Amino acid sequence: MDPLIVTQAINVLYAVSTLAVLALGLAVIFGLLGVLNIAHGEFIMIGAYCAYITQSNGWPYLAALPLTLMICGLLGAVVEWTMIRPLYRRPFDTLVVTWGLSLLLRKIAEAIFGLGYRSLAIPLPGTVQFFGTEYPIYRLVLIALSCAVVAGLVIWYGRSRTGSQIRAMVSNPELAQAYGISVRRLAAGTFITGTCLAGLGGVMVAPLVPVQPFMGLDYVLRTFFVLIVGGLGSVPGLLSGAAVIGGFDSVVSAATNATNGYFAVLVLSILFLWLRPRGIVARG
Amino acid sequence: MRAASLVVLVTIVLPLVLSQFWAYQLGLYGLYAVAAVGVGLCWGQAGFLPLGQGLFFGLAAYLSGLAFIAFQDHLLIAVVALPFAVLVAGLLAYLIGLVVFRRPDQSGAYFSMITLALCLLAFQIATSWNSVTGGFNGLKGIPGIPGLDDFSDVYYVSAAILLVVLAFAGWLYTAPIGVLWRALAQNERRLQLFGFNTNQLKSVAFGVSGLMAGMGGAIYAPQQGLVTPQVVGFGLSADLVIWAAVGGRGSLLGPAIGALVVGSLTAQLRDTVPFWEVLMALFFIAIVLVFPKGIAGLAEPFARFLKARTSRPALTAPKSTADKPPARLTIEGIGVHVGEVTILDRLSLDFEQAGIFCVIGPNGAGKTSMFNVVSGELDAASGRIGLGDADIVGLASHRVSSLGVARKLQIPSVFPELSIADNLAIALWSGRASKLQLLDPRLRRWTSPMLRELQARYPFLASGSRKAAELSHGEQQILELSMALLTEPRVLLLDEPCAGLSPAETAAVMEIVRWAAQRLGGAIIIIEHDMSLVKELAEVVYVLHNGTLLAKGSVAAIQADPKVRAVYVGGEK
Amino acid sequence: MTIQKQGPTRRTLLSAAAAGAAFGTLPGLIRPAAAADEFKIGLFIALSGPASLFGPTQRACAELAAEEVNKAGGILGRQIKLIPTDAGGPPAESTKSAIRLMLEEKVDLFVGSHDSATREALVATIKGKVPYIYTPVYEGGECAFNTYVLADTPEQQIRPSLTWMMKEKGAKSIYMIGDDYVWPRKCNEHAKQYIAENGGKVAAEEYVPFGAPNKFEEVVTRIKSVKPDAVLITLVGADNVNFNRTFAGFGLDKDIARLSLLLEENTLLGVGAESSKNLYSSMSYYANAPGDANKKFKQAYVAKFGDKAPQLSLIGADCYAGVYCAKELVTKAGGTNAQKCMAASEGLTIPSAAGPWIMHGRHVDKTMFLADCKGTEFDIIKTFPNVKSGDECKA
């Protein structure tokens, strides 16, 4: 097989799977709680900086995970308690307040780390022969990891007791409360899960992208469009959205150039928002 | 008037007090303020948040810039061309609104995201289309408006436009259309049930905001001499939202204050005050959480002091425009399915054109769903609904309402943040006010003989300035019922009108219903659970079960019917 | 309807007091205190926005130069006062700041280190009323009245280095990748000329949207299939970092050389040691550039700022040169009269951090360096003395 085609095909897979895992946190928060968390990108940024701290201290890369979970979890809890909880029924206000939050987080990152780019050494450097072409090992690992994370979350959500409690809360909060489900704690937990997932995504992509305080902005728009195209509140929706947005961008960029890819994503998102606002897979 | 004169005075005097640079700065930020007023209109009045107003500001700026460059030898032509640039922006906004709001289930978040995506698209186009827009470096060499060379001249142009826009917005906000926008933000469904095409209302709001943004942009080009893609992009759009929020999106002056004060202070202090942006972010968060009314909210008591309150005489509303003789409502073979579940199963009912009818049935029988199909809020998979000669199945709910079908919802549904007077006025405008009349503030003083009669019975309906939210549950029921009656419908659908009422309140409602039946001469269809009420009021009773008609007849006949008893009691006696 | 009377409540009075206080302090904000006979330089640097990572070093280098000049007597006896102003926002903001600096601070001269869109706006605003010295890398072609350009031009950056690449490294086919705006496009125009002169060919010319969140897997894969000898990179900032890391991540750095035109210390740190093999950069200043001038400069820099010294790079060093240019220009012209400055600028010698520069046609001829990246350090392998700007203004 033509190595170029194979490589571009893997690129598409990479684009889709990383987009899915990066959008996961947002999908959880937007889809389940109806909260527009514009600061989502900043939690990814926090994860990336946690990875940086881990590496510059000489710890093994995996140590970034507990560090990220701790910081994103704590921060998520504080944010949920102070900013999100009062505003659950007001989507515009959560949008606006999380925007202020994202400004704040960027400035704090700038104050601590400065504005320069940080580079992380890739944990698994080098390339490997794969279907007749050379492909970076770490990216292949990421593809596998992303699938694992998404699959793991889906299974947990579908099978676990907490998962069914969340489903109950989403469809009928009053009834769920009446059944003794602590909606408050569950909502907070959902939000924290969302921010932790974002941080996790940051740890995963940190070795591959320039790490700097503004990096979150790149992700917010892409991930929002993934959700809107794919449909809220469902994992098939998330995956189809990632497939469409990531896939389209990658394919068009591969076939023509990056500008067309970017244009294609914007136009596609607008079309979806207009023609199929519930997304490809509407909430069942 | 006092407030308005004060504002104009300050505007004229200000540049004389301040330096030339501040005149220039306020002149620039005045243009942004004009666009911010548009954001306030959409967000603070009509309740949806446009995240991409830069699109319209920038579009008008580029058009204006191109016109000025094209006509640089005949600059007066360019000046004449300015309104066209503005109109293009406004028209584009209106069309986008029409197209986007038409979709069902358009929650505000989607609209916001579409405007954001459009703005990003415009930014990319502006950056890439080098030959027309000058690409990233922008459209340069735009000549200035002839006769305005000094920095402070720019201020006066901006100030004039800002004042005109504020006056225009102020007029719209006090006109019926402003009341309708605010009503829309609070309870869109209820407004549709009064016969108002809310999609069009929102599109008009968006179009006007596009016009305002366009006005700012059209002057920006000749003033700056350079138009870069940033003007179309997300940065400006985001700033407009922040300024509107901080200034106070719900008030008239708020967004303008936000742009002028916060905008210029930020530019001024950003270089000198460390962590200025952190402070702004915290301030911004505080505004949203604690101070949603923004700076304008702080000034509210001051503003009240300025506003003179005079009472003006009421005007009598004209008779209803549509010719609405009594009509029979017939439901034929209506089927409604949601997924696997059948809600209505080939339901067929027909009602006489006048009288009081009750629909009863156990929970889940489909009573409210039947109402929803009639009022156009639920889609029927099959069947026909006749109102007189017309087939109304599948019509949008505002269309059905305008044909003379009024509805009172199960949970009292009024416009809580509007005054009682405005609530009642909306009912009066339904079916009587033409589109053009909605711009006439005098309509807010409409009354009708029926309203006077209602106010005689229920004096609280006359305490016009109280907010509807301050009323008790029972009073809200009566308010909503009155509003439905005021539209003088030929078919009135009442969904459990006495739910949650005390015995005294229940008796009052029953009295109104009887009075209304006589007064309006149309059909009143009531969903009720309380058999004592049904006995008192109903001429004919319809029993629904599992989405289909089980029995129909007088109260006595229904009570004796074994089928009915089986359903209610669960077995043969 | 009754008329409601509302007397002034406490809240009203407090609001009025607050408004009054705010209004009272406004004049203070509007008219800053005037100091005696300073030479005011409006310094436009990136204090916000994507280029703000250079802000600290721009400011530090400019302050160092100002301090040195002041110690030596200032400009014509007047002590320099720098007024750092943000140029990282939209051009309209910079325009406004320029107006403020001219009307209120009455600056004597501008030194600017920012992008071209802002430069165009400033040129239109300043209208040559005061001298304006523009310092960072740019695309050439600025000949406005009373405007002096210290920037590296495409001819300076590309001709010697690309020629070396093609002759010494035997690179025949060149792949050009850049951000889509005027500087990369102009650079590539020049590059195509030099490629033709040296008997090479252009493998491809590709652009990515400027300001969009770009990723480079597809581009890199395309380069891999085309198999050029070298890649000429005119990407900036995060795109530059991202591209280089992806390029190396796919293993292309083994066979294909890269020449990046805006690769300075901060960006190289971002690129990282693993991704910087076979990567070259060509600019007029590096922190470890050879020569006494740089040694002295670095000593003074470290002495002044100590541990907190922001990373030295071209963008900052240019501001140092900018302030010195101001001193030399005004001293030679005997004042800030525009005509005299224009005349004095011809043949002017400017002491930059890397050595003296000579101004011709309001652009400077300078020594260019070609550096190989070793880890996160630059190793200067070639020095091209006295490279002409190629952009001398005729009038």
Image (cartoon, rainbow, N blue to C red):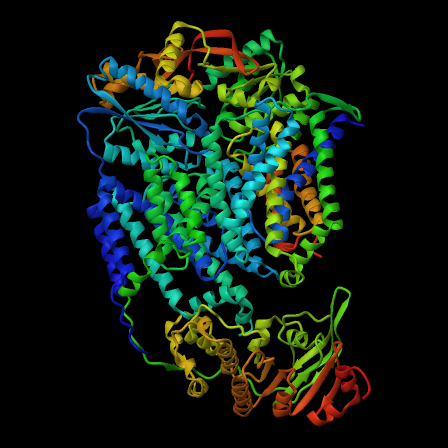
Residue B480 location in percent, x, y? Answer: 51, 77
Count of labels shown?
Answer: 0
Determine which quarter of the picture holds residue C76: top left
The quadrant the N terminus of chain C occupies is bottom left
Residue C363, position as x, y percentages in the image: 37, 17
Q: Say left or right for B49 vs B365.
A: left
Farthest front residue in view: A180
Task: State whether residue A257 appears in this view.
Answer: no
Question: Where is residue C175, by image quadrant?
Answer: top right
Q: Nearer the viewer, residue B298 or C290?
A: B298
> Is the residue B272 above or below the residue B11 in the image?
above
- Residue located at (53% from left, 90% from top): B511
> Eyeballing the image, is C190 above or below A6?
above
In the picture, the quarter occupied by the C terminus of chain C is top left
The image quarter in which residue B556 lies: bottom right
Residue B264, percent from left and from top: 33, 44
Q: In the image, B95: left or right of B563?
A: left
Residue C285, given in percent of the width and then of the height, sits at 44, 14
Q: Is residue C67 visible?
A: yes
Decide which of A136, B478 is in the foreground and name it. Answer: B478
Position of residue C125 relative to residue C375, above or below, is below
Q: Nearer the viewer, residue B138 or C83?
A: C83
Asked whether, in this view, residue B493 is left or right of residue B64, the answer is right
Residue name at image x 31 percent, y 33 percent: C98
Determine whether B121 is above or below B514 in the image: above
Which residue is at a point 51% across and 55% down the rendered structure image?
A86
Q: Residue furthest left?
A: C36
Q: Tell whether C193 sits left or right of C57.
A: right
- In this view, the residue farthest toward the top is C292
